[in-house]
Amino acid sequence: QVQLVESGGGLAQSGGSLTLSCAASGFVFSDWGMSWARQAPGKELLWVASIWRDSSKTLYADYAKDRFTISRDNAKDTVYLHMTNLKEEDTALYFCAKGYQSVLPRGQGTQVTVSP
């Protein structure tokens, strides 16, 4: 079955950076686009970014453009989200999801907390 395990979250200061990782298994990773989504406390789940199966195209939510970079390593079945210039409003539980512009199926998430 599809398994997605996120890691790399933690506490960062405003203006700082974090890189999230998501290890995938249970499907042919290189056949699928992948996405990141996030959910802030008490708020809805939001799509963040997607990457095509061969990394030939990427897509970002407006709030993520110019600050976040999605990438993947098909040899490692892993997708990444590099986040820079973090803001307090980036505080959320971050999930990776199978599929392009998708939020399902997704893993358990990794918490990112941005302090002032």
Image: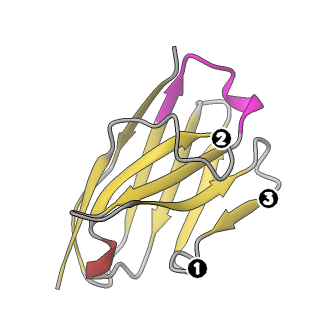
Tell me if residue 19 is in the magenta stretch: no
In this view, 91 is above or below 66: above
Alpha-carbon span between mark 2 and mark 3: 13 Å
| Discs 3/1, front | 1
Alpha-carbon span between mark 2 and mark 1: 19 Å
Label 2 amino acid? Answer: Gly
Name the residue nearer the viewer: 22 or 73.
Answer: 22
Name the residue nearer the viewer: 93 or 8.
Answer: 93
Q: Which residue is mark 2?
A: 99
Q: Which residue is mark 1?
A: 62
Quadrant location, the C terminus: bottom left
Which residue is depicted at the point 29% across and 62% down? 92
Alpha-carbon span between mark 3 and mark 1: 16 Å
Q: Which mark is residue 54?
A: none
Which residue is depicted at the point 59% across and 30% down? 77
Q: Which stretch is magenta?
A: 23-32
Say whether disc 2 or disc 3 marks the residue closer to the N-terminus. 3
Left or right: where 30 falls relative to 85: right
Label 3 amino acid? Answer: Lys
Residue 89's spot in the image, x, y percent? 30, 79
Residue 90's spot in the image, x, y percent? 33, 73
Tell me if residue 28 is in the magenta stretch: yes
Label 1 amino acid? Answer: Asp
Which residue is depicted at the point 72% across and 61% down? 58
In this view, 78 is above or below 59: above
